[in-house]
Image (tube, coloured by chain):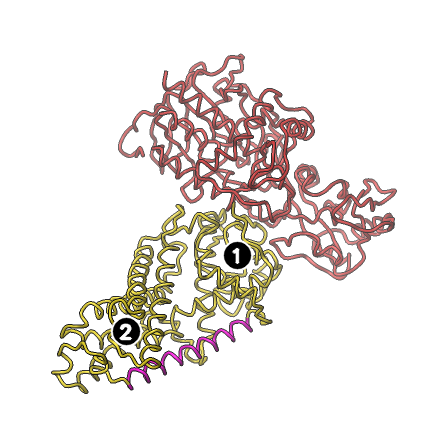
Chain colours: A yellow, B red
Amino acid sequence: MLATDERPVGSSGAAGEARRMMEICNACRYCEGFCPVFPAMELRRAFPEGDLGYLANLCHNCKGCWHACQYAPPHEWGLNLPKTFAELRAETYAEHAWPQGLGQVFERNGFVISMATAICLGAVLVLTVLLQDRAVLYGAHSDPGAFYAVIPYQAMVWLGGLTFGWAVVAMAMGARSYWRASGGGPLPWPALKAALKDAGQTRHLGGGGEGCNDIDERFGVGRRHFHLATMWGFALCFAATCAGTVMDHLLGWQAPYSWYSAPVLLGTVGGIGLLLGTGGLFAIKFRTDRAPEATARWGMDLGLLGLLHLTALTGLALLAFRHTGAMGVLLAVHLGFVLALFVTLPYGKMVHGVYRLLALVRYHREGHGAPSGE
Amino acid sequence: MPDPRHGPGKRYDVLVAGGGNAALCAAITAAERGASVLIAEAAPKPMRGGNSRHTRNFRTAHAAPTATLTDSYPVEEYLDDLMRVTAGKTDPDLARMTIEESARAAQWMHAHGVRFQQAIGGTLSLGRTNPFFRGGGKALVNALYLTAAGLGVDVIYDAEVTGLEIDDGHFTAARLRHRGFETRIEARAFVAAAGGFQANLDWLEEAWGPGARNFIIRGTPYAKGDVLKMLLNAGFEPVAEADQCHAIALDARGPKFDGGIATRLDSVPFSIVVNKAAQRFYDEGEDFWPKRYAIWGRLVAKQPDQIAYSIIDAKAEDLFLPSLYPPIRSDSIEGLAGKLGLDAKALKATVDAYNAACAAEGPFDTKVHDGRRTTGLAPDKTNWARPIDRPPYTGFPLRPGITFTYLGVRVNTQATAMMANGKPAHNIYAAGEIMAGNVLGQGYLAGIGMTIGTVFGWKAGEGAARHAGN
């Protein structure tokens, strides 16, 4: 007998469920102190699909609203916002994927990521072995240009550049599509700046100061800290790559670099951050109460976590053993994981960063202050 | 935790019957004083917390602005407010004690894991008087259960009290039914914090007559009043009348139990409200809704078949929070009457008479008593009266929704239950809805239920721990 029962359900089950729940939440509003979703909800009386996509991506899955919900199962209304929003988020990733047809990869994302990784890893390894002389592959190299002795410079630059360039374009196209679907409009700098600040601090994994409900009804900052380590670890690794590119292409200094050089320092710190961050997020995932989790979508989450973890692990191993005969194989394995990461970047969980950032921009553009913590 | 399937449980210092805020405040207070405590909660874990699960704030006195409250709310003003809403039907000593102690309630809650937020949303303007629990009452209950667990308090869920062994005010043991198994728990002291009897439709019918079957129970279905009845049968003195309760008017389409806040309907001041004969029966514009919502439950309860209809036109649609249920709409008053099951001619006549009586002078303003009133009607609408003349017309059905009943056991300022012969019980304490009628003989003051539960929960816990220690 809820309002939604007499209205057409959204095009998907998740949107219809999200709308039904938002209408109940909007009549309750007890959770408004937890996160931006509720103040944004309170501005609305009706929930068209674009708005639901906005709210779903504004949700940081802290699960405060699940544990505080007086209407959670076994209540007959059976509210479960974190799970419903997680499912709807995955649908928005598919809907705005570019090119459109590739949205299907979000359906079986864990499978797709693992297959893509297997193929990339296999291809790089097989090609390296086929194309390189055994003596080169298993020899110890430490002179400038040693890496290129194993994997040719041209192959590295072209493959890396093309796949990463494609990922950037595809994610930008997805961002454009998502922004339009959730209402469009300008992207004012103050809102963007505020959104970047929120994202940089993962402020809304703070749940209003106490943290998220990582495991159960206790609040904790574990997920926030591990997410920060993952995000900034990734950013530092990316910065390491940029620094290496500048040193190599502009300054003509060829890798491997010494341990105190910018690329190695950034990459080491970033790699350790990624390793610890993804490991911690894995551990939380396996310990958490599954009731508010969209476990059917875990393949997507675990796929990216695994890929990042293995990329970091092989990168650090390469650093540790780069002056030994293991360097050739380690380099090939590491670059295999990096290639898989680049190829799947716009077709996996990584896109959450883009859509959530845009949702935060819209949130700030709507002129909300902070959710009222203490 | 005792498992009744393995024979009698261990003996506790304090047994607390109930699992809401009052029970938790008592259990935590007793455990902090070194007592071993068992909480027997009738609900399963996901539904634990009694009506506290549906609350959002409590009313506290404070002398200066706090992190979440503006201005000050002096004890004397709070007392005046209580005297006004109860028309003096309160125990002045208990009322003063409750209000004075309320000043430390927010701090105590914070120290025990509860978090607060600014009162930014919703319909009630309570930013000066009531701190809001972040996440609402279930978040508060979760925090207090975690704190209790940290203090070693045992909790048994799905545990219904089926009997109390009490002799002349002296408690020795309680019988519990847990998932079909019966067990007997001995304790040195007993805290009754098991709620009112609002979920017991038979008892409501005794108090209200057959119309009670049409009431909606807003809160937990576990408040059957069993412990209250056992205490009254064991010779404790009742307080407040059985038909006194906190009741509001809410959307008649809500669930029978546990609908909580979400089925409330705030259209009344911007509407006319008619009964099933399509006649108005009370001044819809008497005061702001936050000051009047609590009387409309009783008003609707006294109408035939306990049903009423709030009727607005297109001008009023956006003046109140949307209902959870779809608006019932028509382009004509007669058409709306048909959809609501009312006599079309009668409703048209009521609306026409109301429209003719609307004196359209001065600006319509929802923020003040705008004085736009009708003249010559019985009853008149004294504020926010505008003709109902712009289609589509919308109707919402209203039912009385009971939050909690006031009939309880008399207590003293130590939360000790009082015998009918005037003697205090030896080792029995009461807190929460089961004794709220001591302070609330009638009427309601938003958020005072949780304040009573908190303060008497502390007192009960202190008393029980002191007794157990002797």
x then y, percent, for residue A48: 58, 66
> Residue B9 is drawn in which quadrant?
top left
- Give the residue type that dot 1 points to: Pro
> Residue B27 is drawn in which quadrant?
top left
The image quadrant where one finds the N terminus of chain B is top left
Question: Any mark on residue B143, and which?
Answer: none
In this view, the residue in front, A357 or B178, is: A357
Q: How many marks?
A: 2
Q: Is residue B428 left or right of residue A340?
A: right
Which residue corresponds to mark 2? A337
Which residue corresponds to mark 1? A36
Is A166 one of the magenta-colored residues?
yes
- Give the residue type that dot 2 points to: Phe
Q: Is residue A344 left or right of residue B429?
A: left
Residue bounds of the magenta highlight: A154-181
x then y, percent, for residue B195: 50, 32
Is residue A278 shown above or below A221? below
Check disc 1 and report its element: helix, strand or loop. Answer: loop
Lower position in the chain sequence, tag 1 or tag 2? 1
Residue at (67% x, 36% y) in the render = B298
Q: CA distance from mark 1 to mark 2?
A: 36 Å
